[in-house]
Image: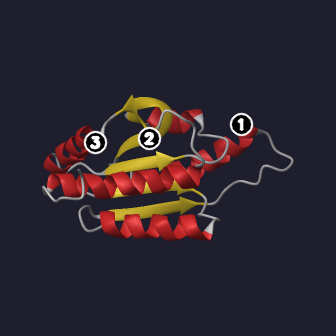
Amino acid sequence: MKVWVAVVGKPRDAALATAIREYETRAARYWPLDVIEVKEEPARGSTAAVVMRKEGERLLARVPASARVILCDVGGDSLDSVAFAGTLQEQRERAQDVAFVIGGAHGVDVAVRARAERRLALAPWTLPHELARLVLAEQLYRAGTIGRGEPYHK
């Protein structure tokens, strides 16, 4: 099993970028982890639909066809950390690759939604995509510690 995190854009805030890297590095101790960053589409002179379509095409082109796609979306399933860890463990037991997708500032295109087998809410609020990536990275790390019975999750 391999875990992919596919995101639109790179973190712009240096402090967030450092925190994201830290938790992605920690998570990679537990799950084979690859991060895919695709270019943000400039919004100037374009509609949100065009931006989402172009970013969606970039995301789908880079996500492995064999991976189970889980879209991070405010309207998705709410899981506590233990249930999330269980979901990842099930995927590991099935040897099924998983790709978590985080859209850009305008959201994700319908084609990305159609490719997703599941939607996962990272919070009941809409999060900036950089913060969503940090939350996901921390939860991937936490899920690994839960799976090994380590004391991080209290």
Left or right, residue 77 beside residue 52? left
Q: Earlier in the sequence, mark 2 or mark 3?
A: 3
| Amino acid at circle 3 | Phe
Please tell me which residue is depicted at 47% across the width and 47% down the height of the picture. 101
Q: How far apart in space, not on screen, are marks 3 and 1 (Cα)?
A: 31 Å
C-beta proximity under 8 Å, tags 3 and 1: no
* Displayed quadrant of residue 144: bottom left
Decide if residue 63 is in sight here. Answer: no
In this rendering, the answer to whether 88 lies above or below 77 is: below
Residue 8 numbered tag: none
| Amino acid at circle 2 | Leu
Q: How far apart in space, not on screen, are marks 2 and 3 (Cα)?
A: 11 Å
Residue 122 numbered tag: 2
Q: Position of residue 65 (x, y in %)?
A: 38, 49
> Which residue is tagged 3?
84
Q: Nearer the viewer, mark 3 or mark 1?
A: 3
Q: Earlier in the sequence, mark 3 or mark 1?
A: 1
Please tell me which residue is depicted at 18% across the width and 43% down the height of the picture. 90
| Amino acid at circle 1 | Ala
* Displayed quadrant of residue 122: top left
Q: How far apart in space, not on screen, are marks 1 and 2 (Cα)?
A: 23 Å
Please tell me which residue is depicted at 84% across the width and 50% down the height of the picture. 44
Q: How many numbered markers are drawn?
A: 3
Q: Residues within 10 Å of mark 3 (few under 14, many from 20)?
A: some
Callout 3: SS: helix
Callout 1: SS: helix
Q: Position of residue 13 (x, y in %)?
A: 63, 65
Q: Position of residue 36 (x, y in %)?
A: 48, 61
Please tell me which residue is depicted at 24% across the width and 46% down the height of the picture. 85
Residue 49 numbered tag: 1
